[in-house]
Structures are given as structure tokens and as C-alpha cells.
Amino acid sequence: MPVFLYGDTETRYLRERDPLLGAAIDRIGPVCREVIPDLFEALVHAIVGQQIATKAQAAIWARLKERFGILTPDLLLSLEPGALREWGIPLRKEQYIREAAGKIASGELDLQAVERLDDAAFCDELSRLRGVGKWTAEMLLIFCLQRPDVLSRDDLAIQRGLRMLYGRRSFSDREFQRIRRRYSPYGTVASLYLWAVAAGALPELRDPAPPRRKAAAKPPLSQKDRK
């Protein structure tokens, strides 16, 4: 499986822009996160993973790939409705997947054209799909298209990583946008390290926010992603 590619250019820039993040980069070392180059497969993978643990998503995905190999719109549309429940996919998620597959197969949604859009337009276009919101689209920008400058405000793990890194209880929207500009044009690599921090890569760092609910290492869903 390919991984998100980055190197010294990105990490050197982030070290210069943010000494705290730079120190974390030096201690954590390279971060390997797998990507799915095919946008339709990546979309199905993202929908499968909504509101379930990362390990559960990986298990379901492995079963799907073992059974079907390359997932295509035509292949999934050829299955009987409800067939994906055999592999652990609830009916609602299957409906989202079939609707997306139908729009792609009919030509209503041109994924090749969508891939060429800038980040904001890409998110707007994919968010038209039922069951897909801004957060899902942003994750596809990273884990499919490998766009270099994505730092998701809607991501609880990103927020948690920032709180732990800076020792702050919260960040206003203005403060978050300032951090985003600081990391730009390599916000995605910053995201990889903030996820690692949030997941406990630097054990001495604690989340200073009052405990409400545990922030998972896997980012949350936006409201539209939950529909």
C-alpha cells in the first residue's frame, strides 16, 4: 500500500515556522500513513469507516478487498441491495455507497474532473453526496489525492494535538486560522504529526482541556457525515 509522501523540504519548513512542532517532528521521526490512490475506492473506504474504530474499518476493508479485488461503481451496483451487510457494512452506509456509485456510473459525477478541482471546490463538490461532509472530503484530499496543505478545523484529533503541543485548553477560530497559515503550504504534514501527538507519540504531553469525552486518534465526523 502506498503512503503519503513527504521529505526534508516539508519538515525543514515546519521546524522553521514552529519550534514546538519542529521538536515533535525530530522526536517522532517519519510518519507513514497509507493512502488509497483511486478516488472511488478511497470514497468507499471513508464511508465504511464513519463512526467505527480504525481497527474495525481495516478489518471490513480487508474482507472487501479479498472478496472483490478492485472496487468499481459497476461492480458494487451489480450486487443485490443489502449484500454488503455480509461484510459488516450497515444498510445506510451501503445506500450512500450505491448512490455515489450510481452517480459516477451514470456520468452525473465525473471523478476525474473532481480530482482536478482546488481543495475548496473539491470539498464542495463531494459534499453534495449523501453521507459525505466536509471532514470526509478533507480526509480524501489527504489520504487519496495527497494534497499538501490540509489542516482540518473539524478534526477533534487535530484540535487535541494542538492543545497538547501548545499546552492550551482551546483555540479560537481566528487562532486556528493563524496556525493554519503558519503551517501553509505544508499543513498536511503538520496534520500527520499532530495526529501522532494526539495518539500519544510523546507520552509526557497531556491534553489540558477539561475531560468531556475521549478524543479518538481517528478524526470525528461532521454533522453531514453522520447523516
Image (tube, grey):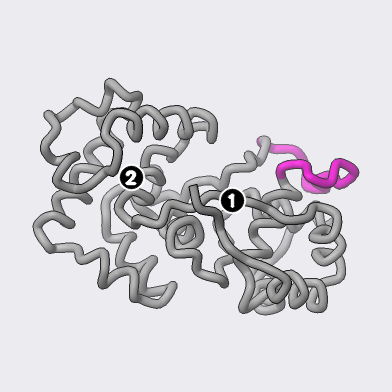
Query: Outermost residue toward the right?
Result: 204
* Whole-percent x, y for residue 176 in the image: 67, 69
User: What residue is at 30 percent from the left and 53 percent from the top?
Assistant: 40
User: What residue is at 40 percent from the left and 57 percent from the top?
Assistant: 37
User: What residue is at 39 percent from the left and 66 percent from the top?
Assistant: 123
Image quarter where the C terminus lies is: top left
Q: Is residue 166 visible?
A: no
Q: Residue type at mark 1: give it.
A: Arg
* Whole-percent x, y for residue 9 in the image: 70, 76
Q: Residue type at mark 2: give it.
A: Val
Of labels 2 and 1, the one closer to you:
1
Q: Which residue is mark 1?
A: 33
Q: Is residue 176 visible?
A: yes
The disc at residue 189 is: none
* Secondary structure at numbered mark 1: loop
* Whole-percent x, y for residue 11 in the image: 74, 70
* Badge 1 density bin: few <14, some 14–19, many ≥20, Cα 10 Å: few
Q: Nearer the viewer, residue 149 or 130?
A: 149
33 versus 211 height, above or below: below
135 versus 95 height, above or below: below
Image side of residue 146 versus residue 79, left or right: right
* Secondary structure at numbered mark 2: helix
* Badge 2 density bin: few <14, some 14–19, many ≥20, Cα 10 Å: many
**Would you say residue 207 sits in the magenta stretch?**
yes
* Whole-percent x, y for residue 108 in the image: 13, 63
User: What residue is at 46 percent from the left and 51 percent from the top?
Assistant: 222
Quarter of the figure with residue 78: top left
Image side of residue 86 versus residue 189, left or right: left
Q: Which residue is mark 2?
A: 44
Q: Which residues are magenta?
A: 199-213
The earlier-in-sequence mark between 2 and 1 is 1
